[in-house]
Image: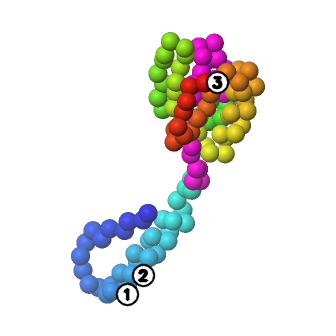
Amino acid sequence: MVVVTRWYGGIKLGAGGLVRAYGGTAAECLRTAPRDPLVALAQLQILAPFEDLGALHAALAAHLAVKQEETFTADGAIMRVELPADQCDALKTRLRDATRNRVRLHSPSESRTDD
């Protein structure tokens, strides 16, 4: 988004001159501005026993996941994470292999039944 603000009034440029000045300023801003890629994000809910929390945290860091929420139960941890959508399958595979499939991952929109 580009906002061009006129600080001083006046009519010397005329309507066409103002449009050209504002348009040129906006174009220059867009040309020189840094560009950040848009990354689609996904959320996952993860259920992990205590003995797998070390492997879980290492995997989260490796797959650019950000922990949004973490609660502990008598059996382990439940956490909600956000990560790039293209990293979901790789994270699931890594956790399956590292924890002998003890960690459960769910999309928050999925209804969950306790295994």
What residue is shown with label 2? 20
Question: What amino acid type should be assigned to the residue bearing mark 2?
Answer: Arg
Q: What stretch is highlighted in magenta?
A: 37-59
**Residue at the image point whose x is 67% and y is 41% from the top:** 87
23 over 104 or under it: above or below: below
Among the two numbered marks 2 and 3 on one chain, the one whose residue lies closer to the N terminus: 2
Specify whether residue 12 is in view. yes
Mark pair 2, 3: CA separation: 59 Å
Specify whether residue 57 is in view. no
Q: Where is residue 21 in the image (x, y as percent from the top left)?
A: 40, 78
What residue is shown with label 3? 103
- SS for tag 3? loop
- Drawn side of residue 13 relative to residue 70, left or right: left
Q: Which mark is residue 16?
A: 1
97 over 22 or under it: above or below: above
Q: In which quarter of the image is the C terminus?
A: top right
53 over 29 or under it: above or below: above
Q: Within the image, what quadrant is residue 83 found in?
A: top right
Q: Nearer the viewer, residue 67 or 16?
A: 67
25 over 57 or under it: above or below: below
Q: Residue 37 carries which label?
A: none
Q: Within the image, what quadrant is residue 97 found in?
A: top right
